[in-house]
Image (cartoon, helix red, strand yellow):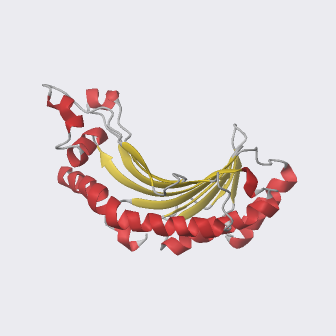
Amino acid sequence: MYTPFASVCDDFYVNMRLATQLSLPHNRETVLHFFERVQRQFPEMSRFRKYDNGDLSIEENRDNDAYRWVTLESRRLCAGHVNPENLEDALKLHGLLLQQVPYDLGFSPVEVDYLDILFGFDLSFRGNHDEIIAESLLQDSPLACLLAEPGAKAVDIQPSITVALSEDCRLQGRVDIITRTNSYPVRTGDYSNDVISVYLILRRYWGDRPKDPMEKIIAQMAERGEALCIEQLIPKVLKPISSIIASRS
């Protein structure tokens, strides 16, 4: 796993999402040609699957500690690299896909809706996830006021905040905290060993039709996202969460 993030999570991943205004092609010849091109570059991506909703995917063995995946949806192309050795390694897949789509899928930059890069961090914890978030991130916040009530228990605390990172608001950043506890385990004490996920998402809306190639734009967004993770997300979000989890172990 990428060294700067290994100490604050159990799994780290870098995902890319390209959303379009028009439907992407799903005919047999086009799809197979596209995935074969991906497989030639990454031979371990050998598991091809079609889902009931029509989505198509190819991926490496998910039993491995590190693996890549690509999914072709109706109007989105999504990909991810779990536990890459470094950011450059993760961007090899994303850059290749963004170079290929105009040719292999008949895709035009005119139809782009947005381009995302997601930095994801999973932290395993068997217990009340929402309680962990309340204690680590909302300890002195007025938003946690209801927890002061006698017998109150956290059951749904998933902060999310979005900000504009450019004057035209076309580049936006979002932090999402995803918990996986519901009322049943809180009531019964029967918790599963699930993960708390922390996402930093940079989204570039395409209204101004940028002239730079998409692979260059995703690299710039990744560089910005990496800096935000190191300077902001790790010290202010991930370390407090991991510290509280460690204190409960």
Q: Residue 63 placed where, x, y %?
A: 52, 59
165, 177: nearer the viewer: 165
Q: Would you say 29 lies left or right of 205 here?
A: right
Q: Residue at x 48, y 60 (%)?
A: 13
The residue lying furthest to the front in this view is 167
Residue 233 is drawn in which quadrant? bottom left
Q: Residue at x 70, y 50 (%)?
A: 49
Quarter holding the N terminus? bottom left
Q: Residue 64 placed where, x, y %?
A: 52, 63
Q: Residue 112 placed where, x, y %?
A: 69, 52
30, 137: nearer the viewer: 137
- Count the marks: 0
Residue 32 is drawn in which quadrant? bottom right
Q: Would you say 192 lies left or right of 58 here?
A: left
| Residue 149 can be seen, yes or no | yes
Residue 151 is drawn in which quadrant? top left
Q: Residue 2 placed where, x, y %?
A: 43, 71
* Above or below 128: residue 89: below
| Residue 93 can be seen, yes or no | no
Q: Residue at x 30, y 34 (%)?
A: 190
Q: Would you say 102 lies left or right of 64 here?
A: right
* Above or below 117: residue 158: above
149, 249: nearer the viewer: 149
Q: Residue at x 27, y 57 (%)?
A: 236
